[in-house]
Every structure is written in C-alpha cells, then in structure tokens.
Amino acid sequence: MSKVNQENMLSKFSVLMANYNNGKYIGEAIESVLNQSLTDWELIVVDDSSTDNSVDIIEHYLNDHRIRFMKNMKNMGYTKTLVQLVSKVRSNVFGTLDSDDVLTPEALEEMYHAHESNPQSGFIYSQYIYCDKELRPLGQGLSQAIPNGSTNLRNMYTGAFRTFKRDIYQKTEGFNPKYIYTEDRDIVYKMEEITDVIFVDKPLYMHRVMLGGQSNDPTKKPIG
C-alpha cells in the first residue's frame, strides 16, 4: 500500500497531544502510544512554539506514518491548541493525552471497546494513577462513576483518560478557547448535557503531578 493511501485511511482511535516545552517527558508520552495493544490509531501532535528541544524529540518518531505533527509559529495557548487538534481528527473516537503523561498499554483498546459497546455514549472516561516526576505511582486518581441523581457540577467525577465520539462532540461548541485553565471542566459539563457519560473503572492513564502544570499549580487549581 502506498504512503499516500496509508495517510488517507481512517483509524479507529485518534490521540491528541498538545505540547509546550515538555521535551523532558514527551518521548515517554509518544512511546506510550506506540506501545498500545490496539495498533490502529493516529497520534496528532501540535507543538505550541516550544523553546526547548521538544521538536527534535518529536521528529525522531515521525518515521511512523500514524503520527502527524504540526508546529504553531507562535504560542497559542493550550486550549486553542486543543481546538486545532480536534479539527484534524480523522477517527470517530478520540482522546486527549498531555505530553508529560502516559497511557497504559491497554488504554486505547479498552476505550475503543467501551465506545463500540456503548454507541449511545459520546463521552467515556477512565480511572487514572497519580505519579511523581519519575512516573512512580503515588496513588489512585479520583475518577468514579457519577452517582445517580448527581452531576459533575457538584463534584468533578470525570478524570483522565477522557475520550469522545467525534460526531457527538460536534453537537457542542467544543473546547472554549477563552478558558485558559478550566477547559477540561467546561467540556465535561457540555458533554454531560447531551450524552450518556460512562466510567471505565480501570487505571488507563498515568498522570504526573507537576506543580507548575495547569491541573496542579496551587495558584491555578482553584479557578476551576
């Protein structure tokens, strides 16, 4: 099969990765996708004008035709980069992976099966593991099934790995680029309004606790 035909094929799963100055960790993030038990995927990486060695590391992996790479000429910010990534998706199922985190080897297979088994659900998420900078587990994450009669407006039940059906996601306004620190909460609320939300009670995502990151910085976290 020619390279052109390969690039035009639809994959079962799209992994979206926005990167800015995570050269120290992005290689591990990419390799966690390469090591998936499900092999029919595409990885879309957008580098948001990094000033470190991120691009050199990303380019090392571009011999795999399943990896697509773009560079922003100027820094757009995380949420605008997410919007850009979603616009490039060629699969009906996609999920987001931060460039300093990793997926467990069965993550894509488990999530794709969950979407296939639950066609009515446009938003499926998993349990995750908190890790230190060296990716050593610290403890289980806080994801859980939404209790009957409750909602994410009362408590944020839905953590990573967050995955979407594209056709249902497109019924919302999507990620809001005006939100700098709370884009994850906003999209969860939007999806909960229009579709069944399903929890996969397996730790499929390993999240580094980085105090300077948006999700753990004590000066940013309360904004949620």
Image (tube, rainbow, N blue to C red):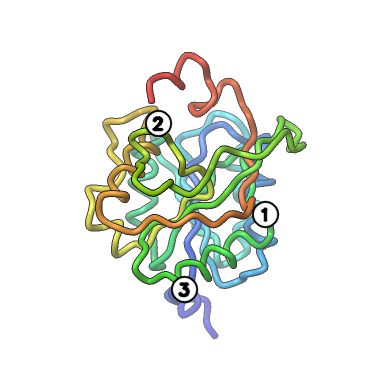
Q: Is residue 76 visible?
A: no
Type of amino acid at the residue the image marks with label 1: Thr
Whole-angstrom CA distance, mark 2 to mark 3, is 39 Å
Residue at the spot of label 2 = 75
Q: In this view, does 151 lie above or below 132?
A: below
Mark nearer the viewer, 2 or 3: 3
- Residue 104 is labelled as 1
**188 or 149, which is in the foreground?**
149
Which circle's residue, 1 or 3, is located before the other in the chain? 1
Q: Report the quarter where the C terminus lies.
A: top left
Which circle's residue, 2 or 3, is located before the other in the chain? 2
Farthest residue toward the front?
148
**Horizontal and vertical percent for residue 19?**
51, 39
Residue 61 figure quarter: bottom right
How crowded pointer 3 is (Cα within 10 Å; few <14, some 14-19, many 20+) is rated as: few
**Horizontal and vertical percent for residue 42?**
51, 64
Question: At x 36% / y 44%, what residue is drawn?
Answer: 188
Circles 1 and 3: CB distance less than 8 Å?
no
How many marks are shown on the rendered structure?
A: 3
Whole-angstrom CA distance, mark 1 to mark 2, is 30 Å
Type of amino acid at the residue the image marks with label 2: Asn
Mark nearer the viewer, 1 or 3: 3
**Horizontal and vertical percent for residue 201?**
58, 54
Mark nearer the viewer, 1 or 2: 1
Residue at the spot of label 3 = 117
What is the secondary structure assignment of the residue under circle 3? helix
